[in-house]
Image (spheres, helix red, strand yellow):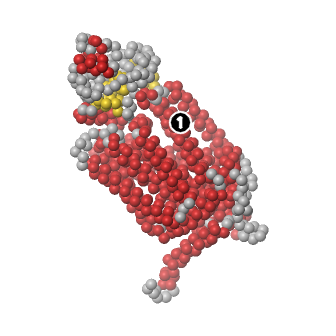
Amino acid sequence: DSGDSISERQEWRPVIYRKCTDTLWLLLFCLFWAGLMFISGYAVVAGAAERLVLGYDSFGNICGRKNTPVEGANLSGLDMTNKKYVFFLNSCSLEIQSLKISSLSLCVSSCPQQQLNSLEDLQSFARNNGSFLCVYNLNVSSYTLDPEAAQLCPTLPVPPSKSFPLFNRCVPQNPECYSKYASVLISMVNEMDVFHRILSGILAGRDTVMGLSVLALAFSLILVLAFRFIQTLLVHTLIALVVFGLLFVSGVLWWLHYDYKNDPSTELETEKENVKFLLGYAIFSTIVTVILLSLIFALRKRLQFAVQLFRIVGKIIGRIPFLIFQPLWTFLILIVFWVFWVAVLLSLGTAGTAQSTSGGQVEYRALSGICYMAWYHFLGLIWTSEFILACQQMVIAGAVVTCYFNRNKNNPPPHPLLSSISVLFCYHLGTAVKGSFLITILRIPRIVLLYLYNTLNQKVVINHFILLQKNSKCLFNCCFCWVCFQKSCLRCFNQHAYTTTAINGTNFCTSAKDSVCILARNSAKLASISCFGDFLLFLGKVFVVCFTVFGGLMAFNYHRELQAWVVPLLLVGFFAYLMSHNFLSVFEVTADAMLLCFAIDMETNDGTAEKPYFVDQELLTFVSQSNKLTEGRKHRNTRPFQDNEDGTELQPM
């Protein structure tokens, strides 16, 4: 039986034979990107992202640029190059009708810094500043003479306002007007669908999010260099910083929640939303802090093995020139793709036809099918991002495999990184496409559940349905946890499949089956080693996220009134984790690939002169010591029970 089982095992052929794998999946991905290119071209032709960024008036003119006329609208097509700010004629009494602000809006060259109480003040302000606050077809000299000036000019008194950098709007500074103005804008955002809320969140905190993303990039680079030259003192320093960061961020979140909740000026809807989100963030952060602190305390005595593991990983990385900078190129590619994706999204969100109304104003009506294009575009974001990360994993795994299965350790193969990149592009792009598609498929149910959850929260529930709604929330939370757990397992599963493809040159399914079989046979030897290494890397990611989110809390706290915390802060946390994962994945992928190669080496060779091992002595000694410690602990845990069964009296220690 044992001979049959051995014969049925996969014959491992490290770096010997290559053929193109999963070609149909690569063709499918190319067709999918052809659809993305069609949507991008359509968005550029039919969209106008400048309307969101620069703002526009009620007559279809985009502020700060020249415009083309709209048929039926006499005041459209004006040159607004010197008029960069949007001014509402009735900023103190804005109302929402069908997701649109009822007040007339104009493009002006400057906002009134002082209160204007009469038409004479409006006329004087226009002559002195060159900023005309009445409708364009009303001459300045007619402000005080035209009987219809009251309808064509702003409601008096005009409150003092200043140009806010967000969307180039004139924001009133009068407390009463300011409160109504902000409430209407926020309520308008709340009534929009998920697609437009994401758009508003990206634009609302675009400068802060970009700055914090750069901060997360700096933290990730520092951490990568630290792991490359790791020492015992550095590990303890990292753990101390993580503990401090977790406790500090949780404390800041609770303090901000207390400050918001007890602030007597908290009246706006955005401030009430901030209180809710801060409470949720504080609870989540506290739970994560307690769990991680418990794990750190329980595993504190095994940190020395993690140090030895990363010392060996650092030696392998030292043999491969420029491998440590591989995540930097991946990050740059991701940034270029994300910028392209956001630009297309903004253009797609503004795609619509300009139509004139009976009053000579202009309305933009969304074209049919835009919503489906937006979801297709969003699917492209997930799949392409995962594909880029999968390519990075295959490149690193291929370079590690090339160096591991090299007999002469003192003379590494020339250019292993370039060789791995060429093998990926010539043979295995389809495998990366298939693995990234599986991750994307698991993300889609999570997005659908989130959409349904938000939809149910917005519905008005009758009294006897309240209990049903609570049960549905609990069910949704359970589904979220289950999907996240499946995604984490599948990501680890994919990594081993990529490494097996780099070794044997087989397709994704065959590689996945072979990697699962060999890891199952060697799980007792390698599981604990891999877990400790992954846990230490996860602490590094937590370090980056903690300090980046803290910077986000401090930055967004300066704009309490006009920004909801949910979208910008989630974006900051998401980007920080993605960047840290992208950079630290060098060590994670290298360690996993090295251990898988070790398991294959132990099964394929026997250490004789005919079949010598590829492994170097340091890794072999490290695995042996780790296994001895694990077996010793198991023996100590089971020995008292065995002695008791034999009738031997247990002696106190």
The residue lying at 43 percent from left, 67 percent from top is 297
If the image is split into quadrants, where does the N terminus sit? bottom right
Spot the residue most to the front. 128
Evaluate whether residue 80 shows in this view: yes
Q: Position of residue 49 (x, y in %)?
A: 46, 29
Residue 586 falls in which quadrant of the image?
A: bottom right
Residue 249 falls in which quadrant of the image?
A: bottom left
Which residue matches tag 1? 340
The residue lying at 37 percent from left, 45 percent from top is 555
In the rendered structure, the answer to whether residue 222 lies left or right of residue 103 reads right
The residue lying at 45 percent from left, 42 percent from top is 210
What kind of element bears circle 1? helix
Q: Position of residue 185 (x, y in %)?
A: 33, 33
What amino acid type should be assigned to the residue bearing mark 1? Phe
Nearer to the camera, 473 or 560: 560
In the rendered structure, the answer to whether residue 629 lies left or right of residue 408 reads left
